[in-house]
Amino acid sequence: MAFIKRHMMLLSCGLAAMLSLALLILGIFWSDKSAEAQEIHTLLQSVRRVGRDSPNDKFIDAIRRKNEALIGQKRQVDQYLARVNPRQPLVPNVFPEITVVPVSIYEFRKAYIAALNELLVRLKARPAPNDQEIREMELQIRAYEEDRRRKELAEDTRSRGSSVRSGVGEDSGSRLFPGGGAVFGPTGPTGGSGIGAYADANMTPEEKAKSIPAVRMSLVRAHEIYCYGSTASLDAVKEVMEWELGRRPDVEQLWMAQMGLWIQQDVLGALAKLNDDTASRLKEEDRWVANMPVKDILSFAVGTYTVGTEAGTETGAAGMGQGAGWIEPVTDRSASATGSSAATIPPPAEPAAAFTRQTSTNNPLADVMRFAVELVVAARDLPRVIDAICRSGFYAPISVSYRTPETDASFVGKIYGPDPIMHVRIEWEGYFLHEIYRGTPERPGLMPQKIKDQIQEGRMLRDATMPGPGPGMPPGGPPQLPPGMRPGAPIPS
């Protein structure tokens, strides 16, 4: 005990040193055990999580319901596409290959002409009166005035009991043609026929409508229709229209005619519905051109497929992508040499010609075609017109230009009414889904193989049978339609 008391300090220090050494050794070994314990804990948590998240019946059922919902949505999309684009060719045995030659081609041409005619009927559209119609109106006015004068003279004879000289209609000319008779002047800015400008410029509109044949016929025509339009306003493939005058059109030209017709049916059908909806809210006597949103179909030009993958340079028409002002449309001025009007051509097919840069080659879902339509519309209704066309199919406007047309107070030719109007050119891009046009492994498409190959290779070269600014458009101007399809004449059956 005395030893412990005597060496207490030394013993305490030694015990503390031994305890520290023991703790040091224990700490070294305990750190390894702690890491192992942490690893075991992490592994246990992973096993528990796998067990909890494993594809049990509830999980599998949820995935199945999700897949069924996606399949249902896909079915709804297919039904919508079938409704928006119910693409049925004009006749069977033509696409993707002609199986009966030349019967199928003849039947296609016949149906093609009838479909173009139906577009004008659907629009309730006719051209401004021509010279012959105005002359017929002049004869009607003259006959009416003579009959009225004869009745007045007969009544006067009975009342006075006196006889009258023969030639009761001798002075009817002064009544019918104030100022000394008709003056056949040049065509006015409204696009009239040039007949019916009379010497007396002080006549009221009512007096003009009563006695001037050109004015009366123009007013009668304006009240007969919802908008102006003629066969010359439509896009028609020359090789299909005049195939009997040369070699027969091939299946590629028939396909371009069919595509152009489908586009025109979509767009012009939407414009016709817009006018019809407006007319349904008007009184019967107000249902005429002056009160319609779409007043004139000036031209429709459909291009070929847009192909290529390189952006290239800005080679498009002036004003492409701009949204204000008037950009003079590209036309073929050489048409004037043949006496026909200049032909508005479609937008350029180069990728760089539109801000979308979309082509049939680089778009994995749809083929791309561009087209242009020129209209005279009520200024306030331009947004409605664009919206109606957008809703008619997968169409996107890529350029809008406009101007105020010249007006003419003579009431001769086209009469648009008193409200502000716009002459507008809208260039469009149309998207045509591969599933509908090219087909699928389960359902063959209608597109000819040669067209598919050209699109796939990034080329859309027109051969000698497809010259000009658009598919089947002759290089010298608008389609030279058969004699029965001149403006103002019905399309032959």
Image (tube, helix red, strand yellow):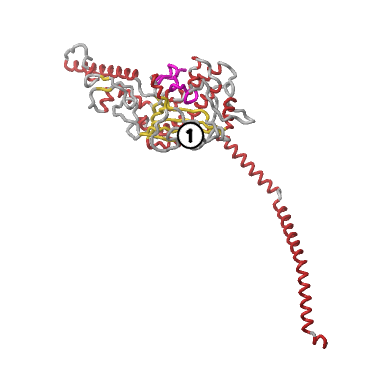
Residue placed furthest toward the top:
166
Q: In the rendered picture of this protein, how many numbered marks are placed on residues?
A: 1
Lateral position of residue 23 relative to residue 87, left or right: right
In the picture shown, does residue 350 fall above or below 52?
Answer: above
Residue 49 position in % (x across, y down): 70, 54
Percent position of residue 89, x then y: 55, 25
Amino acid type of the residue that numbered disc 1 sits on in the rendered structure: Ala
Quadrant of the rendered image containing residue 279: top left
Which contiguous range is marked in magenta? Answer: 468-493
Instruction: Give yes or no for residue 489 being in the magenta stretch.
Output: yes
On screen, 279 above or below 338? below
Residue found at x 77% / y 80%: 13
Give SS at disc 1. helix
User: Could one spot residue 390 in this view of the protein?
Assistant: no
Q: Is residue 464 above or below residue 2?
A: above
Please give the name of the residue rendered at 55% of the width and 16% of the height, measured from the top-left corner.
Answer: 103
Residue 358 appears in the rendering:
yes
- Residue 314 position in % (x across, y down): 47, 35
Residues packed near mark 1 inside 10 Å, few (<14), some (14 to 19) or many (20 plus): many
Residue situated in front as seen by the camera: 344 or 385: 344
Q: Is residue 102 left or right of residue 342?
A: right
Indicate the quadrant where residue 435 lies: top right
Residue that protrudes farthest toward the bottom in the picture: 2
Residue picked out by circle 1: 353
Camera-side residue: 318 or 185?
Answer: 318
